[in-house]
Image (cartoon, grey):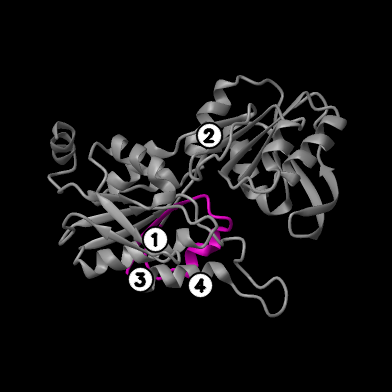
Amino acid sequence: MQASNTHNKMDNNYPDPKIFACKQSETLAQAIADSYGIPLGNVITSTYSDGEFQPSFEESVRGSRVFIIGSTFPNSDHLMEMLLMIDAAKRSSARHITAVLPYFGWARQDRKDKPRVPIAAKLVAKMLETAGATRIITMDLHADQIQGFFEKPVDHLFASTIFLPYVKSLNLNNLTIASPDMGGSKRAYAYSKFLESDVVICYKQREKANIISHMELIGEVDGKHVILVDDMVDTAGTLTKAADVMMERGALSVRAVCTHALLSGNAYERIENSQLTELIVSDSIPIKQDCSKIRVITCAPLFAEVMRSVNANKSISSKFLM
């Protein structure tokens, strides 16, 4: 209670918001609430025998600013739970409803890359708004232009805020930043600018989704410590293949920084047996099993700070900078 009173004074007497968690992000949401200095709200979920579920707020949210925290990685129940909780908050007369999605799922379907396919990221954006979200907070979208799919304000945070201090603490000489594909070159250049390092880019060709047929390296890595940066790691096929190519070209070590650890299929085994020295990820998605090469850096203080600024109507522009 003391922490709450302190924050009220800091935030110009704005009342504390209410923070609630979707089941898949309870651990992260608890860490965010602890960092904010207020208790996590009480939600119970009733489940029918066929799998249908119903979340219920067990406290009043009338007139409150509500933050609902939940990453929408597969399966689709995670997205559905977020939508149901937003709808419940709207029907309970919440004043503002902010959907906090540390990982915005379905974002890889942000365009029509072949005929007769959906643009799922646009559909998810519309579903969130239709449910009643008045603001979105997310981190490291797969494509920046997804922000344009929303008609409501979107706060798009960069995980570099939490990763760069750790990278600097490694004190690596002859550091080179690498992008695992052409699409991630902007992110790689942003990291390299901050770290004052060179950049290399991997050019890959795919047979189909998650399967790489060929990879080439644009740039020199001989005698370099390389850090690959990407927004997500799924099967880890690209990262481990890139690490192999770079070590063959004379790299001293290869690390990877990936914000969202989807890690499906045999990704954990692939990483453990790879030439990667380390895979650095955030806790936007829970790690499902132990792996000696995975280091998790929490994003909870970043989200708590941004949520506190949003609640007090303060600028958060510093969190948009790489």
Instruction: Verify whether residue 13 appears in magenta.
Output: no
Checking the image for residue 163, the label placed there is 2
First in sequence, mark 3 or 1: give its number: 1
Separation of disc 4 and disc 3 at Cα? 12 Å
Report x, y in % for residue 168.
56, 25
Separation of disc 4 and disc 1 at Cα? 14 Å
Judge whether 203 appears above or below 171 on screen. below
Residue identifier under label 4: 123
Residue type beneath disc 4: Leu
First in sequence, mark 2 or 1: give its number: 1
Span shown in magenta: 131-154
Judge whether 61 appears above or below 170 on screen. below
Separation of disc 4 and disc 2 at Cα? 31 Å
Residue identifier under label 1: 82
Q: Residue furthest bottom?
A: 116
Residue type beneath disc 2: Phe
Residue type beneath disc 3: Ala
Instruction: Verify whether residue 141 appears in magenta.
Output: yes
Separation of disc 3 and disc 1 at Cα? 9 Å
Residue identifier under label 3: 131
First in sequence, mark 3 or 2: give its number: 3
